[in-house]
Structures are given as C-alpha cells and as structure tokens.
C-alpha cells in the first residue's frame, strides 16, 4: 500500500520542463539571444539534467528555499484549474437559472389570462367558447410545466407560426365586429403570452413578424381605424391588453415606425390621453409610459409629446412622487422620456421661443436636485439640465442661478452619507455625471456641424444597435392581475 505522500512530488512540485518553456519564451520575446542559447545548452547537457533530477527527489514539497517562480507557478496552476471548474459550473447554473426563470414568466403570463378570464365569468356566465378556451390554457400550462420538470430545457425556440398568427388576427377582427370585448382581450393577451414565452434572442424577430402580418391592419388600409377603436373602448382590462401588446411592438425602431405609419401620430396621441386618465403608478399607466419612452427615440414623434404637454405632465409626476408613493417604473421611464424629449433640436428650439416656459422647466428641474427622488430619476434630471446648459438659454440660466446651484448640489452631494456599497456607487455615478456634463467646455475644438450631423444619425445608430443586439425586454409586472 502506497503512503499518503507517495504522489506528493507530482501533485505539489511544478512541472520543471513547463517552467523552462516559459523562461525560454520570455528570453525570446526580450531578445536575450545569447542568454537563451546558454540556457538551452545547459538544459540539454546531461550534467544539468541530473542536477534537476536530484533536486526534484530531494524536494517533495515546495519549501521556503525554493525559487519564488516555483511558488508563483504552482499557485497559478492550482488556481487556474479551480477557476476553470467554477466557471463551468457557474455557466451551467446561470443557463439553467435563465431557462427556469423564463419558464416561470411563461406560467405567470398564462396565469394572468386565466385569472382575468375567471374574473370576467363573475359578470358573464354565458360564454360559448368557454370550454375551448379553458382547454387551450390547460395545454399551455401543461407545456410550461414540462419546461420546469425537464430542468429548464426550453421548448419555445421557434417563432409563432404563420397559421397561428393568422388565426389570432382573424379572431381579433371577428370579436371586434361582434363587439365581444372579452374575446378581444383573450386574443390580445394570447399574442402577448406568445411574446413573453419566446426565447429572448428571438423576441426581435417576433416583433418583426407581428409587423409583417400587420396585426392592427394599419399598412393594408393605410388607416388606424381598428386600433383607434380598440383604444377608445372604455374597458380597463381591454386597455391593459392592448397597451401591453403595443408596448411589445414599440420595442424596436421598426415597431415605432409601424405604429406611426406615414407619419400619423394618432396612436401616440391616444396613448398620451389614456396615460393621463390612469391612476398614477397603475399597470396600464406603466405600459403607456413604456410605449412613449420607446417611441421617443424617433424624433418625428417629439412634437406630439410637446404639444400634448408631456413635459409638464412628467414634471408634475416627479413632483407628486416627493410626497406620494408612485411606482418606480413610472418615474424611471417618465424621466427618461423627458430627457429624450428635451434633447431633440425641435424641443430646444421650442423652448428658445417660449422663454418663460423654459425658465419654469429649468427652475423646477433645479429644485428636484435636492429633493428626495430616486437616483435613476435624479440622473435623468441632471441629463435634462445638461441639455439646457447652452448659450441659447443664458438668460434663464442667470435668472435661475444655474451655475451656482449646480455647484451647490455637487458640494452637498459629495458629503452625503451612503448606507452601503451600492449607494456609494450611485453617488459616484451622479458626481461623475456632473463633472462630465457641467465642467467648462473647450470650445476650440467645437464643431457644430459635426454635432448636428451626429444628432441626425441617432436613428441610424439605434437601427445598427438593434441589428447587433438580439434580445429585447418585454415588460411584465407582478401586480398585473390586480
């Protein structure tokens, strides 16, 4: 029987030949040709080989007298093997986690439909298609259950088929013609379920399929009558269903272009109207803000936002959040939308002409800096202010003490106490933003034409980004059912 230490030299002692190769590689790289020749000759000689062998036999473990290179090399070897194994395990765990998480979302989205359907049964007990509908949901739930019991192996790796897409569209129009609201809700939510259950890397293609099949019959008729009528029906469940699907479509620039076909902004106007009618923080309001934030990447929609007083509405929403709890999604997406709106040449020109309004906007944004608002919202506020810190608004900046108040904010924010590491990172990010956006600019290298050209190419950059990035995020909230 071998002793416990019989294999120690192989497991503890680093590989001498491998170390020699590293040394030779270094000598070649550093052009130490003479040293390299001597080193290689000495290694080849029998005398040196015997010396090495004797040394290895004498040292079964790396002692304190061993070269530091031995310790370093052996330590790296052990660490590398361990890291490789951990990395493999981590990747496997992450993959399974994402798959199971996706399955959970799929089950949740179907559950939303089931609960809403059961809720509607309280009001209308008569439903001819009830048996068929419930059976379809049972099949879907069974499918998602398989995903979980199969350790997260996804089945939904293909897009919704042409036939299924056509069937959904046909059912949607038939229910609309029959004025069957529950039927319309069912079809719209079913389309959204398909969007949520699809593999993340295929979501962009699914949006393109919805557009190609002209799900709202916009391109075929060159009109928006169908979707406008849906949006005009005063039913909360239907508005939730239609806005959640529009939010899916607006997740790409091509989707925004579909919703604003031929430059018609009627859908955007309707979404703004619904937004303002909702209770602050409600699920439907969240979907409306998601749509408007995504659509704000396209400059042609901005005049609609400005003339429908979205700037005022968003500022009021942030103001309300200081004393009233409002869902962070609404605040985050609303403030991001405000930054996108103010950034455009159209809005800046509009504010130049409306000097009093520009003053009011600047003053309120400066006040927000010291209010207790979420860090993400604060960052968007600072970005808005950076767009207004231009020579064209010199009068408003002087009236509002812009420079002094920014300096005061930086001084105040620099000394606030942070409770944890995450808060410290947020603090550093805010201060870095201020340093980047409000420091004195070197105008000697200013090239207005280049800046203008870059702004005009915003949509092209977004389109290029979409082509490179395969994954989209579709909103799904835990409190949708209520």
Image: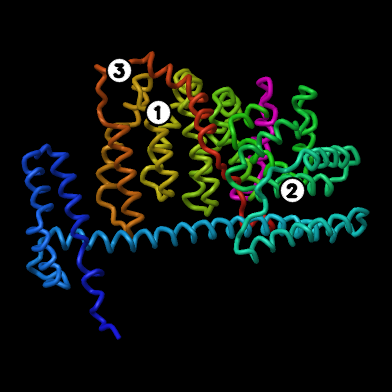
Q: Is residue 470 above or below residue 262?
A: below
Residue 423 visible from this viewpoint: yes
Towards the viewer: 446 or 71? 71
Magenta residues? 259-282
| Magenta-drawn stretch, dominant element (helix, strand or loop) | helix
Q: Which mark is residue 353?
A: none
94 on left or right of 266: left
Q: Which residue is under mark 3?
A: 446
Q: Is residue 306 above or below residue 34?
A: above
> Is tag 2's residue or tag 3's residue first in the polypeptide sequence?
2
How far apart, in angstroms, are the residues tagged by discs 3 and 1? 16 Å
Q: Which mark is residue 387?
A: 1
356 on left or right of 137: left
Q: Is residue 265 magenta?
A: yes
Position of residue 278 measured from the top left corner of the image (x, y, whole percent): 66, 45
Q: Are marks 2 and 3 in contact (CB under 8 Å)?
A: no
Q: Which residue is under mark 2?
A: 189
Quadrant occupied by the N terminus:
bottom left
Q: Is residue 458 magenta?
A: no
Towards the viewer: 56 or 280? 56
Q: Are marks 3 and 1 in contact (CB under 8 Å)?
A: no
Position of residue 183 measured from the top left corner of the image (x, y, whole percent): 84, 47
């Amino acid at each position: 029987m071998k002793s416990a230490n019989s294999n120690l030299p192989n497991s503890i002692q680093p590989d001498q030949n491998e170390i020699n190769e590293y040394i030779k590689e270094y000598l070649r790289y550093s052009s130490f040709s003479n040293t390299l020749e001597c080193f290689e000759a000495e290694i080849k000689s029998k005398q040196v080989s015997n010396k090495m062998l004797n040394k290895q036999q004498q040292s079964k473990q790396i002692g304190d007298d061993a070269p530091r290179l031995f310790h370093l090399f052996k330590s790296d070897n052990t660490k590398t093997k361990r890291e490789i194994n951990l990395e493999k395990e981590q990747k496997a765990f992450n993959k399974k986690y994402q798959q199971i998480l996706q399955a959970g979302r799929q089950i949740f989205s179907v559950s939303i439909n089931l609960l809403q359907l059961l809720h509607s049964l309280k009001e209308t007990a008569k439903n001819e298609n009830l048996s068929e509908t419930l059976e379809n949901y049972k099949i879907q739930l069974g499918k998602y259950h398989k995903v979980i019991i199969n350790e997260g192996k996804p089945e939904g790796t293909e897009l919704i088929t042409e036939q299924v897409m056509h069937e959904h569209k046909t059912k949607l129009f038939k229910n609309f013609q029959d004025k069957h609201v529950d039927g319309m809700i069912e079809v719209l939510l079913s389309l959204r379920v398909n969007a949520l259950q699809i593999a993340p890397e295929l979501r962009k293609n699914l949006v393109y399929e919805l557009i190609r099949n002209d799900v709202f019959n916009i391109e075929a008729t060159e009109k928006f009558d169908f979707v406008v009528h849906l949006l005009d029906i005063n039913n909360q469940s239907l508005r939730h269903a239609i806005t959640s699907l529009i939010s899916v479509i607006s997740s790409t620039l091509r989707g925004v272009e579909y919703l604003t076909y031929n430059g018609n902004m009627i859908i955007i106007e309707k979404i703004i109207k619904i937004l303002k009618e909702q209770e602050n923080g409600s699920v439907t309001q969240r979907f409306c803000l998601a749509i408007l934030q995504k659509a704000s990447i396209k400059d042609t929609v901005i005049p609609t936002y400005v003339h429908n007083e979205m700037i005022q509405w968003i500022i009021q929403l942030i103001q309300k959040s200081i004393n009233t709890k409002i869902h962070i999604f609404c605040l985050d997406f609303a403030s991001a939308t405000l930054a996108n709106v103010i950034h455009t040449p159209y809005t800046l020109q509009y504010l130049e002409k409306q000097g009093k309004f520009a003053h009011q906007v600047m003053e309120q944004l400066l006040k927000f800096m010291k209010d207790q608002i979420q860090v993400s919202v604060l960052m968007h506020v600072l970005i808005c202010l950076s767009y207004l810190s231009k020579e064209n608004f010199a009068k408003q900046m002087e009236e509002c003490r812009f420079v002094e108040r920014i300096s005061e904010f930086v001084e105040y924010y620099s000394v606030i106490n942070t409770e944890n590491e995450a808060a410290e990172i947020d603090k550093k990010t805010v201060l870095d933003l201020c340093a980047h956006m409000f420091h004195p600019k070197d105008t000697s290298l200013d090239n207005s034409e280049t800046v203008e050209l870059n702004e005009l190419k915003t949509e092209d950059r977004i389109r290029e980004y979409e082509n490179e990035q395969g994954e989209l995020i579709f909103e799904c909230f835990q409190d949708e059912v209520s």
